[in-house]
Amino acid sequence: MPNNKTENAATHFEKGFSCSQSVFSSFAPELGISKDASLKVASAFGGGMVRQGEVCGAVTGALMSLGLKYGTETPDDEDAVRQASQKLMQRFKEENGSLLCRDLLGHKLNTPEELENARESGVFNTKCPQLVRMATQLTEEIMYSEK
């Protein structure tokens, strides 16, 4: 099992990429999408969909990765992607208590004041890197250990 994806995702996050970009770009090249394209595709999903506090961007990046691995080009068979995605979401929620960015961080991010409060609290330096690592690690486990 490749074991550098988690550190790669964490490093990307530390460099300023969003949680979704960090996770997705760690898997995309081996799944047929260039790193540059993966960064663009995932750019609108950080902060729970453009800082709206919805599903955590790290989870979204992981789901995009699972979609590339298990997704289908026909509407007939989506069992594999659905099972892998549900497993990821269930395990992430069990570990963290929620899938929602606003719940995970304890802050809303959709106004300048709320974003500044979140920055001042330090969650982007403490909580988010942990979530990026966890989403990447769970994705690796699903993609490499269980198939």
Image: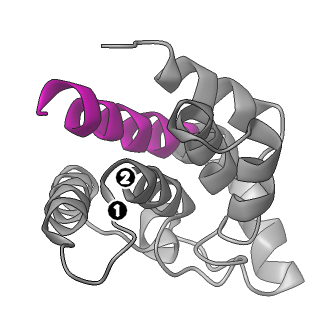
**Which residue lies at the image location 59% right of the left edge and 41% below the top edge?**
32
Q: Which residue is mark 2?
A: 66
In the figure, residue 73 lies in which quadrant? bottom left
The residue lying at 27 percent from left, 36 percent from top is 143
Viewport quadrant of the N terminus: top left
**Magenta segment, which residues?**
129-147
Label 2 to label 1: alpha-carbon separation: 7 Å
Label whose residue precedes the other's in the sequence (2 or 1) = 2
Residue 65: give x, y in percent of width and height. Answer: 46, 50
Identify which amino acid the numbered label 2 is placed on: Leu
Residue 77, percent from left and from top:
18, 73
Query: Per the image, is 81 magenta?
Result: no
Determine the residue positioned at 46% across, 74% down.
Answer: 55
From the top left corner, tell me how far across and down residue 133 is, in percent: 46, 33
Residue at the far right in the pictured view: 112
Q: Nearer the viewer, residue 30 or 126?
A: 30
How dense is the environment of label 2, judged by Cα within 10 Å: few (below 14), some, or many (20 and up)?
Answer: many
Prevailing secondary structure of the magenta residues = helix
Is 146 drawn above or below residue 66 in the view shown? above
Circle 1 packing at 10 Å, graded few (<14), some (14-19), many (20+), is some
Kind of element beneath mark 1: loop
Q: Are marks 2 and 1 in contact (CB under 8 Å)?
A: yes
User: Mark 1: which amino acid?
Assistant: Gly
Quarter of the figure that contains the C terminus: top left
Assign a secondary structure to mark 2: helix
Provide the residue designation for mark 1.
71
The number of discs equals 2
Say which residue appears at 18% left-offset and 65% top-offset.
86
